[in-house]
Amino acid sequence: MGYLEFFWALSPLDLVRETFVHIHAWLSERTVDPDEAEFLADMNRKVDWNDDVEKDEFIGLMEYFHERSSSSEDLSWPEVFISSRGNEYFCEIDEDYLTDRFNLTGLNTDVQYYQYALDLVTDVFDLDCDDDMREQIEKSARHLYGLVHARYITTTRGLAKMLEKYKKGDFGKCPRVTCNAHPLLPTGMADLPHVQSVKLYCGKCEDLYNPKSSRHANIDGAYFGTSFQNILFQVYPALIPEKTIERYQPRVFGFKVHAAAALERWQSSKREEMQERLRETGMEKCFKEDVELEDDMEEDEEEVAGLDGADDVLAE
Amino acid sequence: MSTSSGSPESWISSFCGLLGHEYFAEVSEDFIEDDFNLTGLQNQVPMYKEALEMILDVEPEEDEEEEEEEEEEEDEEEDEDNDVEMRDENGNSVPYRRGAERRHMKVANDITEIESSAELLYGLIHQRFITSRPGIQQMADKYELQHFGSCPRVFCNQARVLPVGCNDIPGQETVKLFCPSCLDVYTPPNSRFQSVDGAFFGTTFGCLFFMTFPEFDVSAKGDPLNLAATHPAYAAPSPTSQAATNPAAAETVKHSRSSSLTSTPVTATVNPNLPASLTPEPLPVQPSHLNGIATSNLAPGLGPGRIHEPRIYGFRVSERSKTGPRMKWLRMRPADMNELDESRRWHDSYGGTEDDVQIGGGGENGGAQVEVPSGRRKKAARSRKRGVGVMDPGAVNGGGLEAL
Ligand SMILES: [Zn+2]
Ligand SMILES: [Zn+2]
């Protein structure tokens, strides 16, 4: 019952509750051995079933559990790495890419036990060493894999793989209400390792957010890099989300708050200045509202022209 | 009855103890018992009377005296024609007993309905309660204890958020979190809040809170995420230093000395500790208060150094590129906050005094400013009056309001 112990060791009790139901359903599809039966009974006793689970925590846990339960001995090192809890943002680097020395240029100075780490990552590791050493090399291998990952995801193949994950919403949704749960992309704020943990970029509001789950707080942002999300949108311009000038307006008893409204007006003037600058490039209609306004104008030009307070109405 | 500190099994405390109800304050019983606070709710909540009784834990118990039950029974008969008919058919021998049985069945059938009505009613009362003096104070205590979490936006540096609604009508939207540091709203990180109605917090609470407690410093403390290490552009000092002309803000500058030293400050020109060579363009003296609030408390998570700068291999992505940044304005804030002093700028250009456009005083840190464009004065004055019942606007410290 190795994986079950593992599971117990890693899962805080509050994560287990809903997971239990699914594990139960999953186990009932195959024969339950006595160890597992005991484990389930134990779980029943220990868990306070009145707690709730964050959805992504739950899914992560389930994936982790499934990964653990399938015979992990057969998996390659990268496969195990990718399916490990906390590594959900990574895509799998092609073996070809990983074994081409050209792609690893310069990384040997940054990674301890570089050769051993590379051997481990490419599954040709056969050094007989103690556990401490093995752990050191394992750590180096993860670091190496991350650094190669940052390079890989800006290649055609890598971009396509990350795009798939983006479309599935593997990186979460933008928490900003106005962004309407737009999917996020992982990004680094620095390209050097050990500077900043991974952040999430929303293409709609163009801002950075902290990952919800603490298990991502320790993932180095350099494993994704600062360029990736911008390259993705350059390669796939059709994916650039529609931007909107819609925003939250703080109100008190229905009134706008003067301080916030003054800032908002100032920001709007900055936006108009930008659109003015963009006019000569022909890209000044960059917001949903510009396009909509144009459509409306075409449809009922006269009505709009006759309406004095049209701006007020739109602003409400 | 004094405040909410009732018995632990009260309906209110058990409601607030439910999973996902962590944001709720415990409405005091005297607030609910004051009919004035419930004005208009009768029409919004089905089974209003039963719901109110449930909230206040005054529902009759099973083991009550028969006499009381009789009275109850008679009350019911007055209300419901059905009961009267039943009694006519069955004669007088066992009407009370049968009635009691029926009542228990009815309770069992309706209990879930009353329960949901009670939750709706509590939510609507809650919306009003948290804009009242004791309610907003209770929420302040919860805010200080970090019950509402922090802003997910990286540049807000874990600023604490408040639960708000984007709508005052129930059933429209779930509860959101308002960040005073970026003046934006976010979906709570945990899915359990996706079943909590935003109207139970309402649209007014978020801003009223920070107007009521101007002493809450919403600017980031230090640099918990160590953004300064990430890129020199992000090492801009806490915008608090913009108000360094007042002693309190100068103190804050001292606290964040480490970040000031490693940075290329955009706005810290008023900091006398820095040599002149490090302070490129001197800014005019910054106002300590602007439009009714402390300048350092106005969206400190926005502005220079707090805007994401897209880069490819270290080079900034040009605005003129198709993939160039288009949303920076949303996170902008003037380096020179005088730019937001609209009335002064307007009067500098056109003459006149501020009193021409403002009702309700104003001044640097005055009472609630209601700024009313011409032709809308009446409406604004009326609405302001309406606010009195719930929250005396005189108690609001600073912060101006504008007509729609
Ligand atoms: Zn967004
Ligand atoms: Zn924020």
Image (cartoon, rainbow, N blue to C red):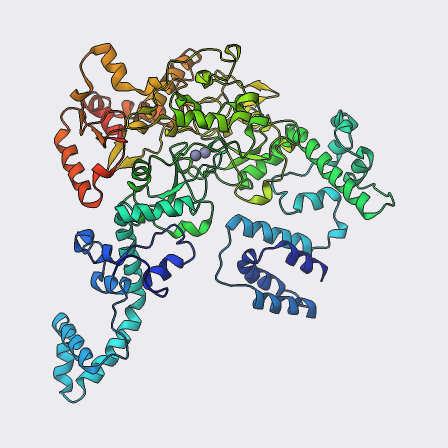
- Kindly give the residue lying farthest to the bottom in the view shown: B93
The residue lying toward the viewer, choosing from A261 and A93, is A261
Identity of the residue drawn at 28% across and 68% down: B110
In this rendering, the answer to whether B295 lies above or below A274 is below
Give residue A256's position: percent from left, percent from top. 27, 32
Res. B372 image quadrant = top left
- The quadrant of the rendering that contains the N terminus of chain B is bottom left
Figure quadrant of residue A21: bottom right
Q: Quadrant of ligand 2?
A: top left
Q: Is residue A163 above or below residue A36?
A: above
What residue do we see at 38% from left, 30% from top? B297
Residue positioned most to the right: A128
Q: Quadrant of the C terminus of chain B?
A: top left
Residue A85: image location, x then y, percent: 63, 47
Residue at the image position 58 percent from the left and 38 percent from the top: A164
Residue B313 seen in render: yes
Q: Is residue B169 visible?
A: no
Does residue A56 appear to the left or right of A268 in the view shown? Answer: right
